[in-house]
Amino acid sequence: MSIGYEKTSTRMIAEEGGTTQQDLYHHFKNKQTLYVAVLETVTNEVEKELINLVTNEQLTMEET
């Protein structure tokens, strides 16, 4: 995130993730597919946390 999407290479992503670029491409077609998968994962986690917050606190979404 510090240098932006365009300047971040799949090689850099793989190194940061402790894997190889080849392994990254085994799981993801390209950088865009990986990016979408990350966004979906983060969105799902945020949704779960919001639901948990509302459920546990017995608040409505408007009250939070």
Image (cartoon, helix red, strand yellow):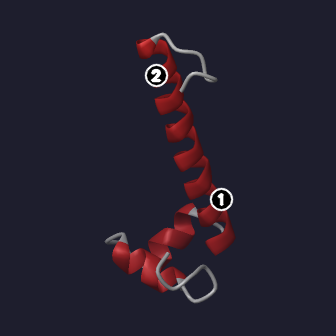
The answer to whether one can see residue 30 in this image is no
Residue 47: x, y in percent? 56, 34
Q: Earlier in the sequence, mark 2 or mark 1?
A: 1
- Taking the spot 51% from the left edge, 86% from the top edge, the residue there is 3
Q: Quadrant of the rendered structure where residue 32 is?
A: bottom right
In this view, 61 is above or below 9: above
In this view, 36 is above or below 57: below
Q: Secondary structure at mark 2?
A: helix
Q: Nearer the viewer, residue 12 or 3?
A: 3
- Extreme left residue here? 18
Q: Nearer the viewer, residue 21 or 49?
A: 49
Amino acid type, callout 2: Asn
Disc count in the image?
2
Decide: few, some or many residues near mark 2? Use Cα within 10 Å; few <14, some 14-19, many ≥20.
few
Kindly identify which residue carries mark 2.
52
- Taking the spot 56% from the left edge, 39% from the top edge, the residue there is 44
